[in-house]
Image: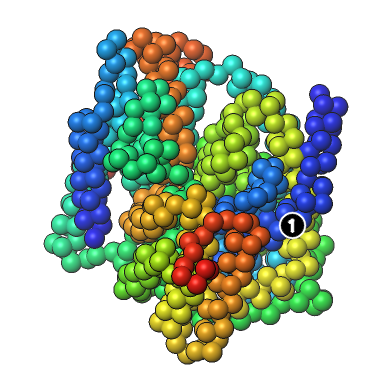
Amino acid sequence: MKTLFAAGLLILAIGYTAYGVTTLTLLTSSGRPAAGFFPLVVGMLLILSCAINLWGDWRAWLTERRTGIAPLHQAEPEAEAKADTLGVHAHAIDGGPEFGRDVLIVFGYICGFVAVMTFVGALLAMVLFMLVFLFTFNRGHPLGNLVYSLALPACLYGLFKVLLNASLPIGPLGL
Amino acid sequence: MLGEIASNLSLGLSVAASPEGFLFLVLGAFLGMIVGLFPGFGPAAGIAVLIPMTFGLQPTIAIIMLAGIYYGSMYGGTITSILINTPGESATVASTIDGYPLAQKGRAGPALVMQAIASFFGGTVGVILITALAPSLADFAASFGPSEYFLIIAVGLLMLTTMMGDNKFKGFISALIGFAIGTVGVDVMSGQQRYTFGSPELIGGVYFVAVAIGLFGIGELLHCIFNGQHRQPAKRLRISFRDKEFWPSRQDYYESRFTFWRGSAIGFIAGVLPGSGATLGSIIGYSVEKKVAKDPEKFGKGEMRGLVAPEAANNAASAGAMVPLLSLGIPGSGATAVLLGAFLMWGLQPGPLLIVNDPEFVWGLIASMYLGNMILIAMSIFAIPLFVKFLDIPYVNVVPVIVLLCVVGAFAINASIVETWILVGSGLLGFAMKRYGYSPAATVLALVLGSMAEETFLQTYIISQGTMSLFWERPVSLVLSVILLTIVLVPAALAVMRPRKAQAAGEAR
């Protein structure tokens, strides 16, 4: 996945630069830098650095495949800092199980929340998100989940809509 | 000069100590303590997520509250470092080394009180130094031209990325991503639209708040979920300040008397330098303290000086980081970058002239930091049992609070669903960046400074007629160019030399 992410960044960098070169003016008629100059500099640096980065990640991935030894995951900066101080390897601190599936589920719920917010209104969307989230990850407390799913959105809605007078999406119920 | 400082501070106190200012200062400090308590959720995320809650406030009051969250999180982050060996945020990592063993020895109370005193000491020394240095630095910076500004931004970003150890190259890419996002919108020089894809909502550019909330808020949240924090049971801890063993002994104070000063000085310097910040300051503070100690073998086994040093350092560093922000308008870390973004959001013009044009704002903020540290030491000692109770809340119940605040907050800024989707996309990007060793802080920093970097770069190019000679013709630029080249070339040279040395050693054997 790390290599795929690096490859994705390289593709985006190429797309960014190509789009800039084709749609933006690089130099004015007097030869001065125009709107496309800075994006071109950034884009070229991005392509170069992303290509080197992808090469490094690819080689690391090949080594992992050959030796069969894969690190648990990228050590967190905090863990690295602590490991430096203690003189131990970062993965000795930052290890443990991973919950990639849960990340996908929560991210899906967040996307769903944003997608329905404009149709059902902010308050109802918040309540729905909380119900779905809590009944997925905190199944043992149905009553608590229900109360929490109603109370927190009501408080936040009151805070943003009433106290801060912010404009939030309004649903069919007028909320 | 002292008279001028006194009159400026009294002006600042009139703002910060007003009923509204004081109320939001207390609220900011309280929220900062809570932000610091939850592992994986740092001050940058806390400030970004809570920016929308400052709508409707006066700019100075809003920034006072946000700054309270920033330095309040330094106090709160240590509570979990000491009690459960889990730093609330990266700047309190070094505090776990001796803080947790102290708690294991049954000295959690004295450790918590000493960390509060050290934090207060470091924070206050830092604010005194801001008071003395920020105006002088702003005066000096008033003569800076575009080349100096561009080089300061470049040095800051490079320092931030080189602090990332093995991941410094990924840090560099992270900064470039920020610059690339910053180019979206109308070009200020020519008026031409860039990367807007015909969307009217992108003409004004990608709004930094949505990106910052996404990268720090949603990104860190997803990372915590990835590490299984949402499946961990709540930590039930009880602590009471009525216990006799709660208070530090006379020996604790006596042994740490020089540590307070050393930690504060080291932390402040680390904070002022762009990119290094509170995390590095606290680690250097700890290492130096261990080196100068006559009994270094005690460190790591519950030594009070090993807790006091990083605590004084990280709080002094958080104050130190305000110096370049207030005097140059250039942040050195993710959290101060978000604060700078908030300055811009409120229509303030950061830079050397900020202190001249908006003295009430700058001095109000500085005065609020004096008051904030006083409030925080009181909260840290007398409200510890209350804050410990927050740890009873399982993370699974914290997740929805963060998601709702992020999504609703991002929408409420400009009532824009496009920006809300930008938040969601940034969240996913932030998670992947954190997971694979990139730096969301560098991205936000580059995004906030992107337009300034572009403008100053082009101005330098035009003034020097394409030769870029301003980078070495002006004395300050020359010094900055040398620093920049040193940052780039020394690690590269070391990287080339290291394998050769190893090879030579292998052959000699």
**Is residue A47 among what the camera can see?**
no
Which of A73 and B418 lies nearest the eye of the viewer?
B418
Where is B140 relative to A48, above or below? above
Q: In this image, A14 relative to A135: left or right?
A: left
Badge 1 marks a residue whose secondary structure is helix
Where is B211 relative to B461, above or below? below
**Is residue B55 among what the camera can see?**
yes
Neighbour tally class for label 1: few under 14, some 14-19, many 20 plus, Cα within 10 Å: many
Where is A154 relative to A163, above or below? below
Quarter holding the N terminus of chain B is: top right
Which of A35 and B496 lies nearest the eye of the viewer?
A35
Residue at mark 1: B26
> What type is the residue that disc 1 sits on?
Val
Q: Residue at x 42, y 63 (%)?
A: A118
Give how far across and how far down residue B445 sits, in percent. 46, 41
The quadrant where residue B242 appears: bottom right
Give how far across and how far down residue B286 sits, in percent. 59, 52
Q: Residue at x 65, y 50 (%)?
A: B56
